[in-house]
Every structure is written in C-alpha cells, then in structure tokens.
Amino acid sequence: MSKLVRDLMRRTHITCPLNTRLGQAALLLAQHRVHALIVTDDAGQPVGLLSEVDLLAGEWLAADAEGLQAMRAMTAGQLMSKPLATIDASATAAEAAARLQSEQIHRLVVTEKGAAVGVISVSDLVGSLARTALERRTVADVMSRGIVVCLEDAPLHSAARAMAERRSRSIVVVDAQGAPKGVVTGFDLLALVAADEGAHTVAEVMHPPLTIQPTATLREAADEMIHRHVHRLVVINPAHPAGMPLGLISTSDIVAEMAEPGSVWQTV
C-alpha cells in the first residue's frame, strides 16, 4: 500500500503573525532549525509561508543603508509566499512528490478537515526513501550538473545575489584550482538578516562540503543526508577528488526522481 502524507508529515509546525519583522522571523527559523514559517492572520488561520529563501531575497534587496532600513521594517505578511500550498493528509506520498516537483516548491502545509495539522517537505519524502529497500538509480542519473560556485573571498552579498538570481538554495565554495572547500546555504546567510553586523566573506560562514561519488545509489545519498542532517551533497570525481565538483545532489533532486512517471513511487 502506498504511504500517505499523514504517515510522513511533521505535526510540529512553527507559526508567526503577519506583523513579524524579518529579523524576528530569521531568529525563529534558526532557533527551531526549520526552513519555513507558517504565517497566520489575526484569527490564527494560516495565510502564507515565509521561507529562508524569501529571507535570502530580502537580504539581497538590503544591499545599501536605505535598502537595509526598508527591509528591517518589512514584515512576514509583506514577504510571505501566498496563497498557501496545501495537501490533504489522506493524499499519497507520490502525490505530494508530484506536487512539489510540478510547482517547484519545497513544502506543503498538510490539512485535515480544512485545518492545518502539519507540514510535509522534500526532506520528509527523502527520509521515507532512505528507509525503503527498493533499488533505484544512481547519483549521476539525477544530480544537478550546473552548480553555482564562488571563491572563498567572495563577499556574502555577492553570494546572496547569485543564489537569488539563479534561484539556488546553496553555493559551492571552491579554491583557485576548483577544489570544493565548503558550501553556503540560505540557512547560513540568515545571520545577515537577524544581526546588524555579520560576516563579510563566504569563508566566514561556509561549512565543510559533504561529498559523494556519482556511482552511489540514491538510497545511499538519502541515507547520508538523513544521517548528516543536510539537504545536499557535493558530487566529486573519485579519480580527481580535489578537482572541480561534478555536480550537486539535493533532496529536491531525489524528490524529482520520485515524481517521474516511471519511478517506483508512481507505479502501483
């Protein structure tokens, strides 16, 4: 029997009012280690979603003193994504994967009888993939080969702008020879939104790259992501591990595979 959304969703979801300032929202995201907040109206009803990607766009707009002042005054209600993307708890995991892929979003608010009861995200679906024994394709089959890279001394504002322009949730930091030195995600850049002063280069906020070989299975990639609590792995050439990365595999890439018409998730 196909797994249902209610079997995989997280029933704990973090909310914030419409008038929450962006700095406060950044603190909530960091404190609760979540990637999005459900924005509620005065009656407590969910009306939108504010993600770390939304805040990343806000950081890009705050490139000068005037822009920063405007962004500090902006609220969750002004920057949130709406209308809210929802899915019923009785829907199948395959339906959720197809929605996330077709709508190019990372999470859905789960409802039962019209009320929000949880959230299901790309990570939740990838977690279920890691627990199954079915054989699947390799990392090389589904990884993203076009990746956003920068040098270690790149200014954080430049990295944020590159990520926002290319709608990328991360940027791979490389040295002058192209060897991967770290990864910076939207979550890493939240400090810029929450604080008046932050780091100045990507080297100050990047974390070490977690790597995987292109011949690894998707199950192995999913297992590594779940074990390490990360959303992406840098794919390296085992013959030249210090060379330019071959690509990047993320939780979104694995969900895209799950949503393919010929995948085991779509075959009953």
Image (tube, rainbow, N blue to C red):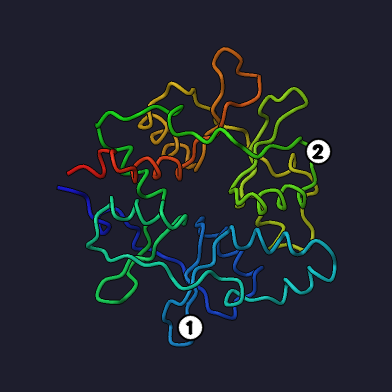
**x then y, percent, for residue 179:** 68, 24
Residue drawn where x is 43% and y is 29% of the image: 141
Is residue 65 left or right of 13 when viewed as pictured?
right
Farthest left residue?
Answer: 1
- As rendered, which of 263 and 193 lies closer to the eye? 263
At a point 34% along the width and 63% down the height, the residue shown is 11
Up-down relation of residue 221 to residue 197 (above or below) = above
Residue 237, percent across and down? Answer: 56, 19
Mark 2 residue crowding within 10 angstroms, few (<14) / some (14–19) / many (20+): some
Q: Residue at x 34, y 52 (%)?
A: 98
| Residue assigned mark 2 | 153
Task: Check disc 2 and give the amino acid type.
Answer: Asp
Q: Residues within 10 Å of mark 1 (few under 14, many from 20)?
A: some
**Above or below for 179 versus 34:** above
Quarter of the view holding residue 202 = top right
Residue 59: x percent and y percent? 71, 61
Q: What amino acid type should be assigned to the residue bearing mark 1?
A: Asp
Q: Which residue is mark 1?
A: 41
Q: Indicate the quadrant where residue 268 lies.
A: top left
